[in-house]
Image (cartoon, rainbow, N blue to C red):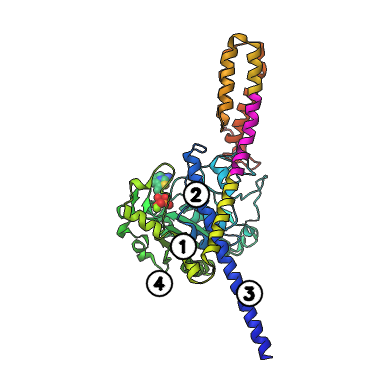
Amino acid sequence: MENTQSATITDEAKLSFDRFRAEVLKDYEIACISRETSLLGRKEVLSGKAKFGIFGDGKEIAQIAMAKFFQNGDFRSGYYRDQTFMLAAELTTAEQIFAQLYADPNLSREPFSGGRQMNCHFATPFVDENGEWLDLADLKNISSDIAPTAGQMPRALGLAFASKSFRNIEQLHAFKSLSNNGEEVCFATIGDASTSEGHFWETINAAGVLQVPLAVFVWDDGYGISVPKKYQTTKASISDALSGMEKKADTNGINIYKVKGWDYAGMCETFEEGIRLARENHTPVLFHVEEITQPQGHSTSGSHERYKSSDRLDWEREWDGIRKMKEWIIANTLAEENELDEIADKAKLHVKESKASAWTNYLNPIKEQVTRAVDLINTMANGLPQHSAALQKLIKELLANREPLRRDVIKSLHDALAFAGNADIAFWTKDYLNDLQKENSTLYNSKLYNDGAKSALKVATVNAE
Ligand SMILES: Cc1ncc(C[n+]2csc(CCOP(=O)(O)OP(=O)(O)O)c2C)c(N)n1
Ligand SMILES: [Mg+2]
């Protein structure tokens, strides 16, 4: 009898160890996928396939830990660094990140904004196509990212305050699809430099007074673009600067934790506690995630080698979160180096394939336009011998462009028509140019506002009497 019991305990212990190990290795894989996405993403911009890129390299491990506590019904109100969180929460794929980088207007490939937003600006829908609320209490929700830094803070406060209202106001208890008795937490993310903004301070103060389920993660990589934090944060530490707002047993306020951005196990433990208290008691929490890096600098518009010392660059390499996680896995005998290298290689291949597929899907419709435009210009060249050479030159140039944009097709058609004047043979070219202009306008200019049945723009006017 005794033997059977101990065998069962051993089996269970082994099972739970296997599950733990699998989860850690999966996390390591996500970190590698995210990093490779950042590295290849930057290359795509620098080689001209996208206009601008901003990525989440250096923040991978912290965001994987954060995603573990993000539940259905929760909201994230964050900023452009959160690609790893999105991958870990299974709200995006590497392929979608590339589709957005290329500004693919197809919503099934770029579901966040259909190519209208800067890259790494995420969103999930809150309403269906008729403007009716989705079952938000059963979904992981992302409030649309916006470019003005710290702009995510007031809306994060509002979302957290909504949960408090759903819990405390009886008339709201009926709205089960919007809230599960206020059990939701709003996860807000912000960079160290943006904590200097008024929106941040007002939000933190209001959260401390109102006692709302808000969890703020400060990704402290020490810089706001090229400006080091000593020039913009009192005591160069946002948690020290905020310490007077810390909640004590008999006061309101916020819980404040300091963690290290490379410390996988430490962050998992600390986030678990802070988020639990926010969810259960509506005590706001701020995690000051220190010692985080940005291996490629701020964005594709600059080189951090120009403003970071070589000591700082060496330190960033040494304390890279993925490197530290790898060391931790090996030190805890969860896997050996070669297994981790295999995971990293597999991740690289996955990202390479995702990138290629996103690019092909983005380019194919444009290539079809090129074929049609070449056909039409060719017909014009045959019918207008005096302009044949010039028109053939346009065709040659368009075909030589290996990565044509919609704009290049439009330009070729436009230039071709300039030669044709009012000649009858230009009729179908004009017609096609017209169609493409309409199509492009729908692709990028529609849906900037709610254009559904409940659009504010559809409210009937009441004329003054
Ligand atoms: C309101 C506003 N001011 C300035 C900018 C330009 N800007 C974009 S990112 C950035 C630095 C942000 O640094 P930090 O908050 O530390 O975030 P990090 O990029 O380091 O993660 C600035 C100044 C902006 N987008 N919005
Ligand atoms: Mg920063």
Between disc 2 and disc 3, whose residue precedes?
A: 3
Task: Let me know if residue 7 appears in the view.
Answer: yes
Q: Which residues are magenta?
A: 356-373
Q: Which mark is residue 210?
A: 1
Mark number, residue 248: 4
Q: Is residue 315 left or right of residue 327?
A: left
- Percent position of residue 121, x then y: 52, 47
Mark 1 to mark 3 CA distance (whole Å): 43 Å
Q: Which mark is residue 328?
A: none
Quadrant in the picture for the C terminus: top right
Q: Which quadrant is the N terminus positioned in?
A: bottom right
Q: Nearer the viewer, mark 3 or mark 4?
A: 3
* Residue 300, horizontal then vertical, whole percent: 44, 43
Query: What residue is shown at x 64% (from left), y 41% (from top)?
Result: 452
Q: Amino acid at mark 2?
A: Ser
Secondary structure at badge 4 equals loop
Q: Of residues 349 and 68, which is closer to you in this image?
A: 349
> For the residues marked 1 and 2, what is the alpha-carbon distance in whole angstroms?
38 Å
The relative height of residue 184 versus residue 35 in the rendered view (above or below) is below
- Which residue is label 2 attached to? 38
Q: Is mark 1 within 8 Å of ligand 1?
A: no
Residue 242 forms part of the magenta stretch:
no
Amino acid carrying label 3: it is Leu
Q: Residues within 10 Å of mark 4 (few under 14, many from 20)?
A: few
- In the rendering, at what x and y percent does residue 190 appear? 44, 54
> Which amino acid type is marked by label 1?
Leu
Disc 3: which residue: 15
Q: CA separation, marks 4 and 2?
A: 41 Å
